[in-house]
Amino acid sequence: MMITFVLLKVPEEASAQRVFSVDYQTQADVTVHVVDYESQADLLVYRVRYPSQARGNEGKWYFTRYGTQAQRKVFFTDFPNQAQLKIYFVDYPSQARWRNNSKKHLMY
């Protein structure tokens, strides 16, 4: 019973929604570009205020103050062709979601 609980718990904790923005691309786990339109995005991101709101891999991101607190380090690039993941920031938590499920693995 305990083993089952641990195995079920791992994916939730392993999912990366606590992010830290790095200064250099070489420091990043994922290179990200913010697009102008929702239709261009792989992921619709809602920025949450508290770390406890950033569970799961559904596009609710909490930006940490330090890299050691983050589950993923991201580098924001100005060029869409350099990005592994294209995101669009949304206004409401209910809008956060994946538009391109083939990119989900980047945030695990």
Image (cartoon, rainbow, N blue to C red):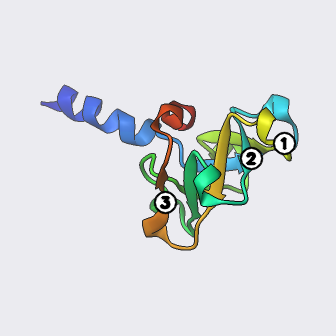
Which residue, given by chain and number where applicable, does mark 3 sit on?
96
Q: Position of residue 83 (x, y in %)?
A: 74, 37
Which residue, given by chain and number where applicable, does mark 1 sit on?
79
Residues at marks 3 and 1 touching, judged by CB atoms closer than 8 Å: no
Q: Rounded to the nearest whole Å, what is the CA distance between mark 3 and mark 1? A: 23 Å
| Left or right placement of residue 47 versus residue 35 in this view | left
Which of pointers 3 and 1 lies earlier in the amino acid sequence?
Answer: 1
Question: Secondary structure beneath disc 1?
Answer: loop
Residue type indicated by callout 3: Ala
Residue type indicated by callout 1: Phe
| Left or right placement of residue 8 versus residue 93 in this view | left
Which of pointers 2 and 1 lies earlier in the amino acid sequence?
Answer: 2
Which of pointers 3 and 2 lies earlier in the amino acid sequence?
Answer: 2
Q: Residue at x 57, y 73 (%)?
A: 91
Q: Residues within 10 Å of mark 1 (few under 14, many from 20)?
A: few
63 up-or-down from 100: above or below: below
Which residue, given by chain and number where applicable, does mark 2 sit on?
33
Which label is found at residue 52? Answer: none
Residues at marks 2 and 1 touching, judged by CB atoms closer than 8 Å: yes
Q: Residues within 10 Å of mark 2 (few under 14, many from 20)?
A: many
**Quadrant for the N terminus in the image:** top left
Q: Position of residue 69 (x, y in %)?
A: 63, 47
Q: Rounded to the nearest whole Å, what is the CA distance between mark 3 and mark 2? A: 16 Å
Q: Residue at x 21, y 35 (%)?
A: 5
Q: Is residue 108 visible?
A: no
Q: Nearer the viewer, residue 2 or 31?
A: 31
Location of residue 4 (image quadrant): top left
